[in-house]
Image (cartoon, helix red, strand yellow):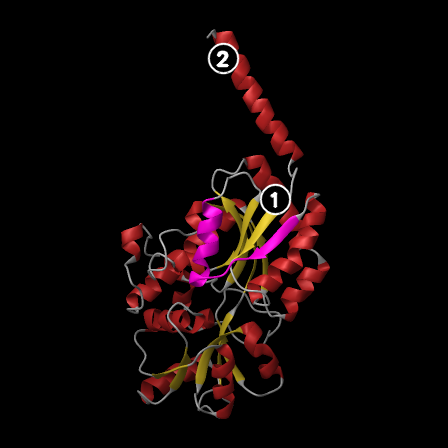
Amino acid sequence: MSRKLIGALVAFGLSATAATAQQYPTKEIQGIIQWGAGGSTDTVMRSVTPHAEEALGGTVVMQNMTGAVGAIALNHVAGSAADGYTLLMGAENPLLYKVMGLGDKDYSEFTPINILARGTPMLVANNDAPFDDYAGMMAYIAAHPGEVRMGATGPGGLPSVITAMINTVEGQIDVINVPYDGDGPALTALQSGAIDVYPAVLGAAIESIRAGAMKPIAIFDVEQNEKLPDVPLVTASNDGYSTYLPWGPFFGVFVPKGTPDDVVAKLSAAYATGAAHPDFVKLMDDRGFSMMGISGTEATDFLSKWQQGTAWLLQDAGLTKASPEEFGIARP
């Protein structure tokens, strides 16, 4: 085959790829939601996607694919063609699959289209708890070892990570960990006085705080929260938390690695437009989430920091099935 013919074929292939990307989408896009209907991830994705569709000029057909803590959906999309026609609509869980023994894939198999929004962790306390702020809580725990009752949920959940973060930054605290099945039962127990303090996501606690049913102790973030502007940041008491923050549960849209750059760019632009829509912004604000709307290197860096910090916090707390070191996850 002559060099001219080879060159022509290569040029034809490149022009065909460019044309395909330029015309994208030419058919329906499948949006695979990791969790069941009615859950937080489902609500977020079904709220933002119609606005993204309008910007994209295409149709995204969403399907809930549950099972194995979201791993079934992730594996399905990871095994699909990297052509932009199968999206993974998920949350933070895959970043812990490897260390928690739930799977051998995570978001390193994907390109982030948009990290839409993030929940903000905070500590809340029973109104009768013998402390009113973070410094007071730490002083009371030190003076009364084994007395403070702190709510907990399963390994990998927000309370377990925040508790591990406190133990890493402050040194092991001597409290009684009281397990619950989730935020709802734990926050009910907090208000009744069954526990003294609980690490919760701001969105789950804010209405009870505003109603005066519990008191805020500290917000785990690097910027003051507009919804609770008078509640201090935990970094004001100990800057050591900056290693792990910002942190929190998040929602994002992903495609398999290898998806053409032009297609990724189109999808990213569409979901950025969708995330900026006033209806979606209001939904996130009403639920206490912080808007992110990041993609590209910024999103990749966020995912890397989130995974490193969380995986090693859980490892040091003895809650993992395998060390992050086995998977090349660097200690922060």
316 sits to left or right of 11: left
Report x, y in % for residue 246: 48, 62
Report x, y in % for residue 187: 50, 83
Front in this rendered view, residue 299 or 56: 56
Give the residue type at disc 1.
Leu
Q: Which residues are magenta?
A: 60-79
Which tag is nearer the camera, tag 1 or tag 2?
2
Report x, y in % for residue 159: 42, 74
Q: Is residue 66 above or below residue 77?
A: below
Residue 271 among those drawn in magenta: no
Q: Which residue is disc 2 drawn over? A: 6
Classify mark 2: helix, strand or loop: helix
**The C terminus, quarter of image:** bottom left
Classify mark 1: helix, strand or loop: helix
- Label 2: how many residues lie within 10 Å, few (<14), some (14-19) or many (20+)? few
Evaluate if marks 1 and 2 touch, with contact meaning CB atoms under 8 Å apart: no
Report x, y in % for residue 245: 45, 63
Q: Residue 176 appears in which quarter of the rendering? A: bottom left
CA separation in Å, label 1 and label 2: 33 Å
- Label 1: how many residues lie within 10 Å, few (<14), some (14-19) or many (20+)? many
Q: Which mark is residue 4?
A: none
Q: Which residue is disc 1 drawn over? A: 267
Residue 70 among those drawn in magenta: yes
Q: Earlier in the sequence, mark 1 or mark 2?
A: 2
Give the residue type at disc 2.
Ile
